[in-house]
Amino acid sequence: MGALHIVVCIKQVPDSAQIRVHPIYNTIMRQGVPTIINPYDLFALEAALQLRDQFGGAVTVLTMGPPMAEESLRKALAFGADRAVLLTDRAFAGSDTLATTFALASAVSKIGETWGTPDIVFCGKQTIDGDTAQVGPGIASRLELNQLTYVAKISKLDLEAGAIEVERRAEGGTQLLSTKLPALVTMLEGSNEMRRGSLACALAAAQAEITVWNAAAAGIEDLLNCGLKGSPTIVKKVFAPGAHTVRAQQIELQDRNADDIARDLLDQIFIRQPQVEADLMRMASGQ
Amino acid sequence: MSDAPRPAASRANTKKELPERFRNHRHVWVFVEYEHGRIHPVSLELIGEARKLADKLGVEVAGVLLGGSEPEMREAAAQASQFGADLNYIIADPILTDYRNQPYTKALTELVETYKPEILLLGATTLGRDLAGSVATTLRTGLTADCTELAIDDERSLAATRPTFGGSLLCTIHTLNFRPQMATVRPRVMAMPEADPSRVGRVVMHPLGMMEDDIVTKVMGFLADRESATAQLAYADIVVAGGLGLRSRENFQLVRDLAAVLGGEYGGSRPLVAKGWITADRQIGQTGKTIRPKLYIAAGISGAIQHRVGVEGADLIVAINIDPSAQIFDFAHLGVIGDAIEILPALTRAFQARLSVNRLAG
Ligand SMILES: Cc1cc2nc3c(=O)[nH]c(=O)nc-3n(C[C@H](O)[C@H](O)[C@H](O)COP(=O)(O)OP(=O)(O)OC[C@H]3O[C@@H](n4cnc5c(N)ncnc54)[C@H](O)[C@@H]3O)c2cc1C
Ligand SMILES: Nc1ncnc2c1ncn2[C@@H]1O[C@H](COP(=O)(O)O)[C@@H](O)[C@H]1O
């Protein structure tokens, strides 16, 4: 087995803490909203860099997006990634998760042909804009990679044997899994902390050559699987959550002290929810 | 790009033209998540929801049970039927004892290809999301994640509504021309249906057709969580939560005190996790837990949309906030405009007094 090769899929997303919705048209107002690397993807990138530091080899970052997504690739290079691929083509516009996984899986294959088959493909747990957590599993199915999602820790990597062991977050506990490479891993948040890139990396990143592929360059011949055409889902309607028709009934303050207000509130709670009162009284009388 | 609201003109008006090969897809399925000896409650919630969709369509509800032991699966199927499933497909094979993506994906896709459902619902748990993504990709069909509302439109298609951009907007997504139409829903988003102990359903057994040697991934162990705040918070009848309005970690104790007197659980808004006042499994909202308690008390929480989507299912929402224009009063049922740091301990005292009267009387 040759040197370790890892691909990390990152997405450039609007910093949703700063997103504003147009009050009349219910559209996202993107103007002036800064973009960031999807925060969950940084856990994946850091995990990849740690493995590379330990075993040698190279980390390739991949993103699909508009030309300006190059920015997030430069950030990843500044953190220490070795090379970056931007997959960009108007044919990808409007992709849902299925079409996104088609494009990304094709690019991962092309990366494999160009720089060596990856041993591990990393994704974040989910994005903060799409928020589906499906792109990772989708890429894994398309490329027939062994799928390890919600990974909290990579406990062992044995390149000789082509084996990997991880701790995976499952319902009600942690699953210890072992599988063979190549594998697709989605990293759980909080699994590590993103390093500060070195000054040398930052300088190199600013100058670095970024590989830009359109659909054809990524080896995609059939555009029917891409973008809107390749997306089985359709967004029919976008709307703002409605307000309740009635606002909260206010407990009158009337210059009363906190204890009087609290007793009033308690009465109102019990009037509206007799079930809660009954449950509490049963609990209090020790039944 | 996925699920970002697209310019509405692009495809919102696409016509439904279901290809011939999908026309005989019928019935609403729920993947019934069974692990460590029990059905995950989200699956029962989904059976309740599936029942409504199926009744609207005039079709049946089927549960899908995958696991290691046939008797256990049959018992779980009986339970699924009490909650509303007309029939259950079971694949019982030792290979399926612990969840692993590869055999579960094979089992579920094969059932879908053989029995052809029109709708397939899964819980948005770690297991459900892991499985749904693979199955949808293998079948090349659409999947809408983390839905908050499911409905059937005039053309008998599934209208799946989900929050997008962290809840700032909602969008309704259709999988018009592919089957099955797949969706995941988070625990507690849908109400738990009533069980009817007299209801029984049919069972269809199906073979897996796989050998352990075919499977590359091995489960080497499982460490159960010691304290599962996760499950307790999501399913508690009474939840008391605090936000940044409490101003300090010390003051957060007031939230815990009230929760303790009420025999409930406590939680908080997202910024408290970052500040280290609460652990991540106690965060309530879009990126935390969805709760549906009988009583929810929110103290010093502004009521941002990301918080709101996690608590809207509560029967009674009580808000304590110093700011009369706080958003939380838009969706709370009862409000107190006041200082949470004074009101919380007073409320704890009031409940204590009322409960001790009852203790003496009882
Ligand atoms: C992608 C994304 C996901 C998110 N997910 C979640 C999530 O899952 N859950 C979540 O909660 N948030 C989430 N958020 C954050 C959310 O947008 C809000 O920022 C957050 O809920 C605000 O927390 P808060 O109400 O505690 O604080 P603030 O918004 O600062 O509100 C504090 C409130 O306390 C009131 N107050 C001040 N002093 C007092 C006092 N003495 N007594 C009573 N009231 C007082 C103030 O009037 C104010 O209304 C998310 C954000 C993003 C962008
Ligand atoms: N456009 C994209 N380019 C690169 N990676 C992506 C893209 N979209 C999603 N991903 C990866 O897939 C993960 C899950 O995304 P999602 O299914 O949208 O929640 C992300 O954390 C990324 O690692």
Image: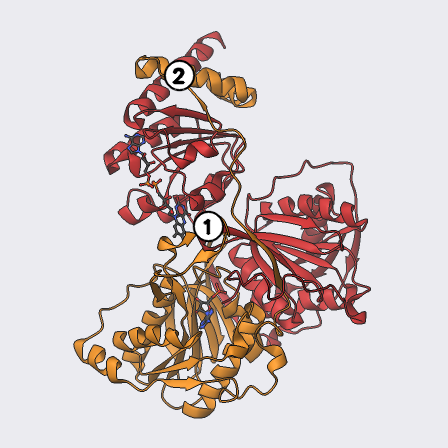
Q: Quadrant of residue B113?
A: bottom right
- Residue B178 visible in the picture: yes
Q: Which chain is orange?
A: A
Q: Which image quarter: residue B139?
A: bottom right
Q: Secondary structure at mark 1?
A: loop
Mark 1 is surrounded, within 10 Å at the Cα level, by few (under 14), some (14 to 19) or many (20 or more) other residues, namely: many
* Cα distance between the residues tagged 2 and 1: 32 Å
Residue A268 in percent (x, y) is at 48, 18
Residue most extreme to the front:
A24
Q: Is residue B189 left or right of residue B328?
A: right
| Residue in front for this viewpoint, A24 or A236 | A24
Picture coordinates of residue B27, whole percent (x, y)? 77, 55
Which residue is farthest left? A199
Colour red, chain: B
- Residue A185 placement, left or right of B207: left
Q: Is residue A238 above or below residue A120?
A: above
Which numbered marker is on residue A252?
2
Parent chain of label 2:
A
Q: Nearer the viewer, residue B348 or A60?
A: A60
The residue to which callout 1 is attached is B168
- In the picture, measured across the screen, residue B236 lies left or right of residue A38, that is right
From the image, which quarter does the N terminus of chain A lie in? bottom left
